[in-house]
Amino acid sequence: MKSTFSPWVLAGLLATSPTVPVLAQSTTSTAPTRSTTATAMLVFTFRDSARGTVIRPDAVLIDNQMAFNTIDEAGRMTAAVTPGDHRVLVKARGYKDLDSRQTALADQAPNNVIMLDPEKEPDQLKPENLSKGMPADGTVIVGFVVDGDTGKPLPDAQAELIGKNVKVTSDQDGFFKLPVHMPDGKQMPDDPRGVVYTQRDFRVTKLGYGFEERLNVLVESGAPKIYQIELLRGGGGNSADENAGRNDLQSSLFGLANVEPGDEPSTAPGRVPVEPQDAPHVHDDGTTHSH
């Protein structure tokens, strides 16, 4: 299927980007707009930064020129360019514009995952909705589950707290919410609110797909943890230990450096919340997110 460009986008470009030339609306043309001397490729995959779901932008401009290249159903696009840095401007209805600098290499074409921020926060992630079903003595682990190839939401995926007999199923948007009780929680150092913390492991699976695990997740009472989970069709899986992703300061403050599952964390003054969505996201195939 060909990607087309909405009239509202072209009008918006005229109104907000006077220095960017706007070409006629595309229909079925797939001819590259780059120079015939191009010897490199830019490869993009477009995703929603809040949900991880596929986006097919209304307009992509490379070096101030509209790119009429095909964007497929999985939000992927390839453009021939000259080696070096290129300005890439992406516009999509319902999302904030993204203006970035991307580097094209002559000897390789890595997939650049472009994350677009929605103009409105998803209803599921609004504080009043995150608090629903949250245990009084704990928190919730929530997330969106998507097909790792197509970026489409995966309903009926099963999310479970490992070893806790707590299981939920994702809805039609691929969204799940795991309640996390924390009777084993340790007092947060120097926190007058009485916040406690501990660690949990969880796994997400779906029939016909592989699995995704997160181990040693640092959870705090009253503080939801938000994830984007990609499952691969046909099997295979990934298990990530979050202890390995914490920096020295965070590990020291929570007493979690080199902690093995089952070890007791020591207490230390201070507090540094650890949020998984703030960490750099690198896929197993070497792709990275631009955000």
Image (tube, rainbow, N blue to C red):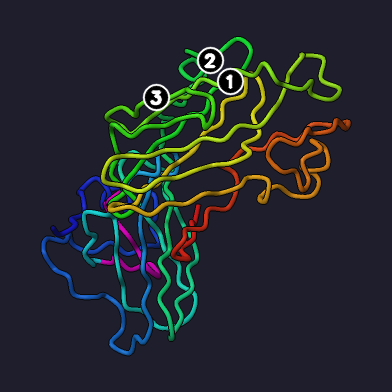
Task: Please report the residue visible at 49 percent of the width from the left and 57 percent of the height from the top.
Answer: 290
Mark 2 surroundings within 10 Å by alpha-carbon count, few (fewer than 14), some (14 through 19), many (20 or more): many
* CB contact under 8 Å: marks 2 and 1: yes
Camera-nearest label, 2 or 3:
3
Question: Start and end of the magenta stretch?
Answer: 55-67
Q: Which of 67 and 45 is in front in this view?
A: 45
Q: Real-space Cα distance between discs 2 and 3? A: 14 Å
Label 2 SS: loop
Q: Which of 86 and 256 is in front in this view?
A: 256
Q: Position of residue 28 (x, y in %)?
A: 11, 64
Q: Which of 112 and 258 is in front in this view?
A: 258
- Residue 72: image quadrant is bottom left
Q: Name the residue under label 2.
A: 134
Q: Position of residue 156 (x, y in %)?
A: 29, 31
Camera-nearest label, 1 or 3:
3
Quadrant including the N terminus: bottom left
What amino acid does circle 2 point to?
A: Met
* Disc on the earlier residue, 2 or 3: 2
Taking the magenta stretch, the answer to whether it contains residue 47 is no
Label 3 SS: strand
* CB contact under 8 Å: marks 1 and 3: no
What amino acid does circle 1 point to?
A: Thr
* In the rendered image, the vertical position of residue 50 relative to residue 25, given as above or below: above
Task: Please report the residue visible at 24 percent of the width from the left and 75 percent of the height from the top.
Answer: 32
Q: Real-space Cα distance between discs 2 and 1? A: 5 Å
Q: Name the residue under label 3.
A: 168
Describe residue 226's horizontal placement relative to residue 249 as left or right.
left
* In the rendered image, the vertical position of residue 284 relative to residue 119, given as above or below: below
Q: Mark 1 points at which residue?
A: 139
Describe residue 190's horizontal placement relative to residue 286 as left or right.
right
Q: Is residue 57 visible to us here?
A: no
Which label is found at residue 236?
Answer: none
